[in-house]
Image (spheres, rainbow, N blue to C red):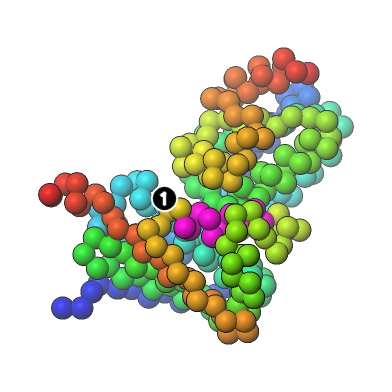
């Protein structure tokens, strides 16, 4: 039997950030996560989608952001993808407090938050082609209840 | 609107109560409203009350840091109060808690500023 999954595609508009995190949190809810785990997931979705909108598409509302979410036992695999400009220096982008857009009051904490809140984070990016962020988190609640 | 911004003026203090969700989409509105309020000559200090803020991400950190700089440039202080554990964790991660004064509730925030002003 294949794993349960869902896929979302939406316009790169900031008003969709809230929709994206609620939709993912609602899908993940079937694993009985704690409130803290859900907050972590909502936060990382917000970070990844905001990055796609601000940096990937440079604020252009006509881009498409794709989120896929797959559940494998107690683990959730999430990917957030855009077909935007890509990240030219990934190592620098992942540094805490580093931002290419200080004039927009960006804190430069997006990647640090994603790394801290998830168990694993992989970034694939190609200048001019887009960025894909893949994250994994094991939901601990079920283990605590049934083992 | 997923974020409500309530501005309240008390002596030389601006009290900003945020309820709802502070993300990239709503941060712009917080910036606009607070920037404008901070141009009032009577406003020196700012209290940011987050009791009813249910969600915040790094865009919130950015807009808070931006207003902190604006308040300090005016010679005032910024106090953040009623911070949830989730928001506090973001303050810790970003180092923001080192420069912000954090108080338990609005009453304490007001009295901490009355001491300095």
Q: How many marks?
A: 1
Residue at the disc numbered 1: A39
Identify the residue at image location x=62%, y=81%.
A127
For residue A110: magenta?
yes
- Is residue A50 positioned above or below A96 on the image? below
Residue A136 in the image: above or below residue A39:
below
Mark 1 residue crowding within 10 angstroms, few (<14) / some (14–19) / many (20+): some
Indicate the quadrant where residue B42 lies.
top right
Dot 1: element:
helix
Q: Residue furthest right?
A: B41
Q: Which residues are magenta?
A: A106-115
Q: Position of residue A56 (x, y in %)?
A: 61, 74
Q: Position of residue A92 (x, y in %)?
A: 63, 65
Front one among A145 and A19: A145
Q: Is residue A133 visible?
A: yes
* B104, above or below B23, in the image: above
Residue at 79%, 41% (x, y): give it: B70
Mostly what secondary structure, the magenta segment? helix
Where residue A116 appears, as percent x and y from the top left, is 45, 53
Residue drawn at point x = 40 percent, y = 57 percent: A118
Residue found farthest to the left: A147
The chain under label 1 reads A
Residue A58 on image: x %, y %: 67, 72
Q: Quadrant of the C terminus of chain B?
A: top right
Using the rendered image of the protein, determine whether residue A16 is visible from the camera's viewpoint.
no
């Amino acid at each position: 039997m294949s794993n349960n999954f869902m896929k979302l595609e939406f316009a790169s508009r900031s008003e969709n950030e809230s929709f994206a995190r609620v939709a993912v949190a609602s899908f993940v809810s079937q694993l009985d996560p704690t409130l803290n785990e859900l907050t972590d997931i909502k936060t990382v979705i917000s970070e990844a989608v905001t990055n796609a909108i601000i940096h990937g598409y440079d604020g252009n509302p006509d881009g498409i952001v794709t989120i896929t979410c797959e559940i494998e036992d107690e683990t959730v695999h999430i990917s957030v993808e855009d077909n935007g400009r890509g990240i030219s220096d990934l190592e620098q982008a992942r540094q805490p407090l580093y931002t290419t857009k200080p004039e927009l009051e960006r804190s430069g904490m997006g990647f640090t938050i994603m790394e801290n809140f998830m168990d694993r984070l992989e970034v694939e990016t190609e200048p001019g082609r887009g960025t894909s962020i893949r994250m994994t988190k094991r939901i601990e609640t079920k283990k605590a209840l049934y083992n | 609107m997923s974020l409500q911004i309530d501005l309240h003026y008390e002596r030389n203090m601006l009290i900003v109560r945020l309820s709802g969700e502070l993300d990239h989409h709503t941060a712009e509105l917080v910036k606009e409203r607070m920037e404008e309020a901070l141009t009032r000559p009577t406003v020196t200090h700012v209290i940011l009350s987050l009791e009813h803020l249910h969600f915040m991400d790094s865009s919130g950190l950015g807009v808070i840091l931006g207003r902190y700089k604006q308040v300090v440039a005016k010679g005032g202080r910024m106090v953040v109060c009623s911070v949830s554990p989730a928001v506090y964790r973001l303050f810790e991660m970003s180092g923001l808690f080192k420069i912000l004064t954090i108080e338990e509730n609005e009453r304490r925030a007001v009295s901490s500023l009355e001491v300095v002003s």
